[in-house]
Image (tube, rainbow, N blue to C red):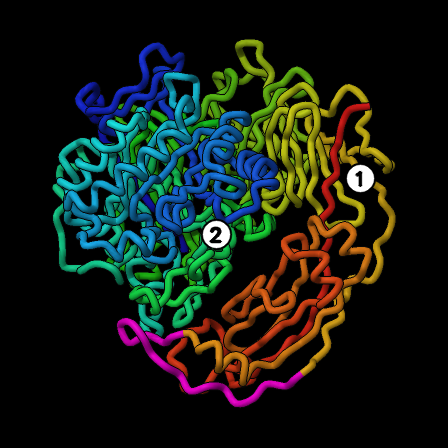
Amino acid sequence: MVTPHRLRVPTPSAPPLTGRLPFADAPGVPDPIEVTSRWLTRGGRPWFPVSGEFHYSRYPHGEWEEELLKMKAGGMTAVASYVIWIHHEEIEGRVRFDGDRDLRRFAGLCARHGLDFVPRIGPWSHAEVRNGGLPDWLLARACTPRTDDPAYLEPVRAWFQAVAEQLRGLDRAHGGPIVAIQIENELYDQPGHLRTLKRLAQEVGLSAPLWTSTAWGGVRLPGEELLPLYGGYPEAFWTEADGGWPDTCRKHFFFTHERDDEGIGADLRPTTVRGTDPASTDRFPWATCELGGGMAVAYHRRPRVEAADVGALGLTKIGCGSVWQGYYMFHGGTNPQGELTTLQESHATGYPNDLPVLSYDFQAPLGEYGQVRPSYHELRLQHLLLAEFGHRIAPMESVLPERLPAGQHDRDTLRWAVRTDGTSGFLFVTNHQPHEPLPDHPGTTFTIDFPGARALTLPSAPVTVPSGAFFCWPLRLDVAGVRLEWASAQPVCTVEADGRTVLVLAATDGIAPELALDADTVASVAVPSGDGEVTPVDGRVLVTGLRPGTDALVEVDAADGSRVGLLVLDAATARTAYRGVAWGAERLVLCGNGVVFDGDEVRLHSPAAEPSFAVLPAPGSALVVEGERVREETDGVCTRYTVEAGGVGDTAARVTLVRPAGPAPEPVTGVQGRASVPADKHVDAAAAEYRVDVPEELLRAPAGVLLRLRWTGDLARAYVGDVLVADQFSSGRVWEIGLDRLPAGELRARGLRLKVLPLAADAAVHVPGQVGDAWRAAGVGQAEWVVTRVRAVRTG
């Protein structure tokens, strides 16, 4: 049975409103940033920023630079970071910007590597921090926080002044990276206070072309003074343990023009407050700052977020109309050790959730120790699309099809949309959501009716859209003189190779890739030998039968004399794609591990004994890795390089049970009746204890070494001596501990101890996917050392 899906593209809307918002870039900058009512521009060109949250104060400062380069390689154009007051001024009057708190150095590193910077200066941040980031000494004063109370504004002014001193000279007027500043966070009912905070920040010298505010939860903003930014998460820790998958998360896997999210932070505000002026969507572009790159784990609720959840949500938001993809978190971290208290959100501080003392991994694309996760590769594929075509997509309007899902629990209606300028566009499909798989959609075709032009119907024959698929297909895309009428494969990026502009595309698993070219723009088409068919059909040249991979290059000579290649990678290979300046030219690099581009070298972050990567176009001279042999071979149209490093030793970790667990402690509840973390005395009394022997050769070179533990129970803590060095609540995930974060001398002398607590059978705790009772028992199973080596690749 054929199921046609139809969408009628309306006549393009009137041009966006310009010049009416109170945002202005510094005079004389070469690429002025402006805001229209529908998109942002930079240097007069539509601009589609991609930002990722990375909290510098939750990560070792000696590793900032490499992690920022990982973010850039992952497609980030900007780095956002809370400037967390309590991290800097835990003790009143002693404001620290040293070490891991060195805000100025962090912003400077962003600038050095061409990354924009977005400080989120509070004063209240949330960020799952103690008091939302407000210092204890401030809360002990006779004042009303988060209001215009003069007794509150006085220390806030001093805090803003300290931040301004750190960022002086890093604004746009001085060639600096600061493109936006966020005021406060999730303050839904104090528009006057938001205006006051902006004025205070400006008075002490803070400056940016964009001033922003979070806008979810029916927020009331002060007129047009702050650019509203939105969010959406695939899962949530802040809801109830027995609440199931929240509808406020479910909604983000549908194409809709509703920007608000009533769920984010709803445990800290009344959900009945609704103050947003509906007209704001007509005045401001759809920009985001908190698309869920993962999710934190609270004691009472421990969601697991998979790479496909993050990827599907991100792609859906582009199809919905987003013009700024902002992720929270893109890089995980670890809470600093407080001098007076621990610094996590907790019931003890009156907050509704108990968070781990140290871990703020957030299941992010880049983990607490810099681990490269599958979600990093999933998102990078989309960011390559935006880097290449974002200036085209940003002005395009989102159009929804004739047949829409009946509601948020409709799992049978295919979810899709088109971004279009009236003559061309991109088709978006999402057939994935967490927890509740969506069905296959057999016999699917799409028809797009453009005004004043013949409709596009694709693919050439009906296909099955597989369960779990999400993708973007081009519609009438111009590529260096050739018009690609449509393709049943996702555009990735372009590179110049062998005198051709090569458009790289990604096939979708389960859907045969097809390419339809406008015959008037084509002089000749050649497919790989013995692979693919070329058929003229009704004014188009249809290419079918391709087997996607590194050799699936369709060579096109354009009617205007230009030369184009269309390289269709299989889905798995496409998710290894990076693009960056390497060895003097823009290149495509295919590598399943971490890759950073840094001047004249490319660095591979790989746990493989013999890491391998492919390059297009190949460099003009041999590639070398100091101290290791590099083997070169042909891989389709790419050249593949393998670093021959030899084998590695046994990676099994030796974990010894020292003391078995006792009975699980009785559950207790705290704020909002939610389960609370067991008291330390109960952990000490009931936890199983293990010793981990660390091989001396790993202690001598701990950088990049992870201890990976599969374990069961309630919570786990790691100690060196009596010092807590890592912790986690069980959610079925592997527990990873970075060896280079541990004090080597103490580790040699006292070893690494693990405490694992069993979970009471009647604890009101949500742990996804667990059946039976065995998972409640305290135990450490498989344990291994994973060594990620960094190899610098240069030309010989």
Residue 77 screen position, x and y as percent:
47, 31
Residue 772 screen position, x and y as percent:
51, 85
Secondary structure mainly formed by the magenta segment: loop
Q: Residue at x 40, y 42 (%)?
A: 95
Q: Is any atom of residue 525 visible in this view?
A: no
**First in sequence: mark 1 or mark 2?**
2
| Marker disc for residue 469 | 2
Of all residues, the one furthest to the front in this rendering is: 93
Left or right of 226 on screen, residue 694: right
Q: Which residues are magenta?
A: 659-676
Left or right of 100 on screen, residue 582: right
Left or right of 705 on screen, residue 771: left
The residue labelled by disc 1 is 642
Q: Quadrant of the N terminus?
A: bottom left
Left or right of 622 on screen, residue 616: left
Q: Residue at x 21, y 46 (%)?
A: 152
Magenta segment includes 671: yes
Q: Residue at x 29, y 66 (%)?
A: 350
Q: Which one is nearer the viewer's eye here, 507 or 317?
A: 317
From mark 1 to mark 2, how far is it between C-alphas?
32 Å
> How many numbered badges does the structure rendering display?
2
Magenta segment includes 211: no
> Where is 658 relative to 175, above or below?
below
Q: Which one is nearer the viewer's eye here, 3 or 599?
A: 599
The image quadrant that residue 409 belongs to is bottom left
